Amino acid sequence: MATLFTSELEEGMVTLTDTYSNSGKLIVPKDTVLTKSIIQMLSGNDVVFVDISDIVEPIVESQENDLSSALDTEKIKEKPQYKKFVHRYEKSISEMGDHLNDIVYKNAPIDVDMMLQNTMTTMKALNDSPLSIFTMLSTMKNYDDSTFNHSLNVALICNIFADWLNLSEDDKKLITACGLFHDVGKLLIPDAILKKPGRLTKDEFDIIKTHPVKGYQLLQKNKLDPHIQYAALMHHEKCDGSGYPIGLKGNQIDWCAQIVTIADIYEAMTAKRVYRGPISPFKVINMFEEDGLKKYNPKYLLTFLEHVVNSYMNCKVRLSNGEEGDIVFINKVRLSKPMVKTKNNFIDLSKQTDINIDSIL
C-alpha cells in the first residue's frame, strides 16, 4: 500500500480504499483503475491524498479511448470475441427454438440438461471475452425480439445475476433454467398478438396475460423442478400485489421468480421491440429506482442495479442536452445518475437533474 499525493498519481494505479471529497461525498470507490479523467476529477475535487494498492494494473496509452468507446457498435462488431459470441448465440437460438417448438407442438419431453448445456456454452463464449454481457446484448439489440431470443437473453442475465448473489452452483443452474423457460407460455399465444406493432386492445392484452398459466401448466405436465414451474407462473407478480395472474405479495412469490422477474423486465425494456426501439439502460434503472423497491425484492434489485451500472463505467454516452461524454464515476446513492466527463467539463447528473443519459454509444 502507498498513500500518494494526487499530483503523484499515474494512469493504471488502483485505489485501495474509497476516496471522498472534502464534503464527505464518495467520488472514487476502492479497486478503481485510475485513468487520466479520474485523476483530473480527483484534482478538481481538491483531493490531496489517495491510498493506492501495491498492485498496479498495466495500462496502455490507448486504453482510456478504447474504454470510452466500448459501446461503439460498429467497432465491437469487428472484434473477434463478438463474432465468436454471435456465432455461438445464433446456434443456441436455432437449437433452442427447435426444441421448444417440438415441446409445444409435438408433445416432445423437455430436455432441461440439453437446454442448460446450450446456454452454458453460450455463456462460456461470453466469459472468454473482455466485453460484458450487457455490451454484447446491447450491440445485438437489432436482433429478432422473438420469445427464443428473449428467453436466452434472460437466462444469460440470470446466470451472471446468480454470481452477483453468490448463489451455489446448483442454484445458479436452477435460476438459469428458470430464465430459459419463464416465457414458454408465450409459444401458445398467437403471433398476430405477440408481434402486433401497434397498441394491444384490452381483449388482446387479456390473452397475453394468460401466458404465465399456460407456461406453468406445460412445465407441470413435464414434471420440471417446481421452482422452474413457479418462475413461469409468477414472473409477472409484484411484491406489492400489483402483478398478475394471481396478485401475490412479497414472500408469496417464489424466490427464483423474484430474480427472473428483474432480469426479464430489464431485458425486455432495453431490447428492441416491434412497437419501439430499445430504451437506454439508465432510463430503465431510473424507473427501477423510482418505484422498484416496492414492486421487487430490494435484496435482489439493489444487487442487480449496482452491478449493471458498474458494467458501464468508462463507457461513452449521449446526454439529453445533446452532449457526449464518458461515465467516470458511479453514484451509489443514485445509480441512474453517474458523473459524466464531457469535452469541456464534468457533469454530476445527481445535481444536474434536468439532464439524463439518453443512450449508450
Image: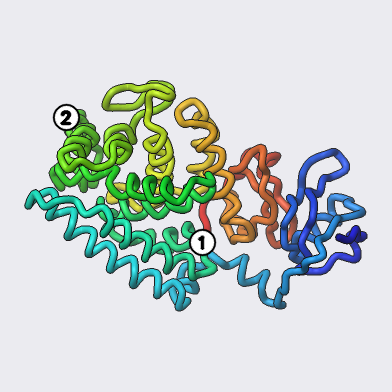
Task: Locate residue 246, reporting x and y percent.
Answer: 28, 23
Residue 76: x percent and y percent? 48, 71
Asked whether residue 280 appears in the rendered view, the answer is no
The answer to whether the residues at label 2 and label 1 have Cβ atoms under 8 Å apart is: no
Q: Is residue 3 visible?
A: yes
Q: Image height check: is 226 above or below 319? A: above
Image side of residue 319 versus residue 266, left or right = right
Find residue 14 and report its horizontal and vertical position in percent. Answer: 76, 62
* Residue sitting nearer the eye, 121 or 200: 121
Residue at horizontal 77 percent and vertical 66 percent from the top: 55
In the picture, the quarter occupied by the N terminus is: bottom right
Q: How is the image coloured?
A: rainbow
Q: Mark 2 is on which residue type?
A: Asp
Residue drawn at (58%, 56%) of the image: 312
Q: Quick one: SS at disc 2?
A: helix
> In this rendering, would 200 be left or right of 17?
left
Left or right? Give the position of 327 relative to 175.
Answer: right
Q: Nearer the viewer, mark 2 or mark 1?
A: 1
In this view, the residue in front, 49 or 337, is: 49
- In the image, taking residue 185 as reference, residue 82 lies left or right, namely right
Residue at screen point 23% across, 47% down: 197
State the mark number for residue 203.
2
Write down the quadrant of residue 70 in the picture: bottom right
- Specify which label sits upstream in the sequence, 2 or 1: 1
- Residue 132 got which mark? 1
Tell me which residue sits at (91%, 60%) in the image: 4
